[in-house]
Every structure is written in structure tokens, then in C-alpha cells.
Amino acid sequence: MSRAGADDGGPGCPVRGREVQGWRDRQKQTSKGRTMAKGIYVSATTPGSGKSLVALGLADTLHRHADRIGFFKPVVTGPSAADDPMVALMKSRFALEDERCRGGLTFQEVRSLLAEGNREEIDSRCVEIFADISRHCDVVIVEGTDLTGQDAAVEFDLNARLANNLAAPVVAVVGAKGRTVAEAAAAVEVARKELSAEKCALLAILVNRADPDLVDAIAAEVKVGASGRPVYVLPELEQIARPTTGEVATALGVRQIAGRPDMERDVKDIKVAAMNVGNFLNVLDEAPW
């Protein structure tokens, strides 16, 4: 990991509604003249950034230094908050009770409320859930949306609003996979300006999934911001991105009929078996064991 220049931050913007503003006032605590927030909002600024892995790593680090961590995902992609895989992973990995690890609204609910122009409802419901979680925690990791839908700009605005309404500083995650040095540095600059325009309080920027050979070059190319916020560049780790044979089997609903029982091997390549078995065996690669 390389650290680049500093970054721009800003104070939280005014929010809508007495309930939300009241939470922000209660959320802030003063320590030696400094305002401290209880939540940290992990927000993607580009699709495919690896945001969830960053949130998991942040939780692991905080778990070592805080007595009680919590996790909140304001918008879940599945049919219900209880079925969200990231919520389930956080619960099992860190032994979090339901009161400290929850999802919020479904993506379909958020779409409907946005279509109705009812953003206040999204704000108030997320603030209520976050407030409940925070009562049982020292720090709460909040994971934003993935920006993978057709309305990425709307999702970015939603993440910025929620971060402000929860009085949570933002860890912005910029995806560098497939980007050149100049493109990655430009993406950092765009994220910096957009978050500043939304008046989000920025904690740090992580340039994630960078080509390992370009990490130092990207760090050197990123311009220094005005407020001293750090920018870190993380390399792409292929072994993390690869699914296991067991995960592929589960996703496809297939069962093993022969071979070794170990289903935790990483899938490094894909062969399309559009031929009979005799011919297909000839295109298989020899296993390293």
C-alpha cells in the first residue's frame, strides 16, 4: 500500500427535518476541542471499487482497538435487510448480535421513495436504525451502495446525504482496476470535488484494486489536497477476487460427482466444454499438485 497526497474535506452540510438534525447534534461528541463522530461511512465513488472488502478490513482493524463495533448497511440489494450477505458476513466474522449489525431499506424501497420524491422518509428511517445500533457500539462502520445500477449519480447523492445525516466522515473508495495512472489520479480528483460539493466530511480516500506495478506511480500522480486528508493506493490481489470451486458450485446449483472433495480451491481459469468428454480432456491444464 502506498500513501499519496492529502485530500479535501468539509464540514457536514445542513440536513432536512428536525429528527435528522437532532440526531446529528446528539451524535457529535467533543474531546479536547475536537468534534468526533461515532460512524465511519465507506462509500464507493466508482463501480467495482471493492468497497465491501475495504469495509471488512476496516471492521477487522477497529475490532482490534474498540470494545464494541457495529455495522450498518442503509440500502441492501436483496429482498430483505435480514438476508443481505454482507450483514450476515459481518455478524459471523465478528460475532455481532442483531442489535449491532443491521441492514436498512431494500433497494426497491429506496427506488420507490425516490420516485415519490420522499427522501425525508429514507433519511429518517436510516437515522432511526443507526441511532439504535450506535447505542450498543463504540464505533459503527456504515457501508454505502455499490454504484452498480443505472442511476449511479443518484446513488452517489444518496450516499453523500446519508453520510451527512449520520454525521459520519467518509472513507471514499475509488476503483483503479483497468485504469491507467492518469485515469486513476483523475478519478481521485473527481471524487474529491464531488464530495466537497456535497459538503461531506472526508476521512480518507482509498484507491483500490490498482495494478501492482502502478501503485507507486499512482501515489506519486495524485495531487495534494488542501486539508491534509490521506490518499492510500492498494494493489489488486488476484487471489481475493477469484471465487472458489465451492462458491461456483453453489451459485450454479451443481453437485460434485467425482474428484477430490476439496472445494476451497481458487478458480484461476474457465474452460467452455462445448465438446465431447474425450476432446475436452485434452484441453485441461495439469494441476500444480
Image (cartoon, rainbow, N blue to C red):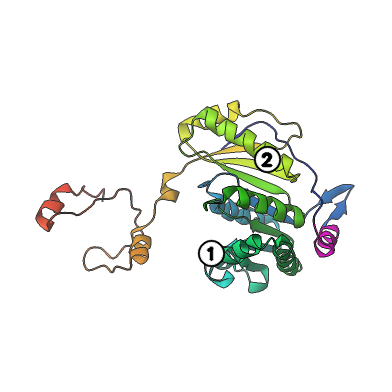
Vertical order, 251 against 240 (above or below) = below
Q: Quadrant of the N terminus?
A: top right
Identified at 54% across, 52% down, the residue is 53
Which amino acid type corresponds to the residue marked 2 in the rendered image? Glu
State the extent of the magenta-drawn residues as a range: 16-27
Horizontal side of 98 relative to 89 (left or right) equals right
Residue 165 percent coordinates (x, y): 76, 56
Q: Residue at x 17, y 47 (%)?
A: 283
Q: Secondary structure at mark 2?
A: helix
Asked if residue 219 shows in the view, the reply is yes
Q: Which mark is residue 89?
A: 1
Task: Kindly check if marks 1 and 2 are in contact, taking CB atoms under 8 A apart as contact.
Answer: no
Q: Nearer the viewer, mark 1 or mark 2?
A: 2
Residue 77 location, quadrant: bottom right
**In the image, residue 75 lies at what x, y percent?**
61, 62
The residue that appears at 12% across and 57% down in the rendered structure is 276
- The residue most toward the right is 33
Q: Which residue is mark 2?
A: 194
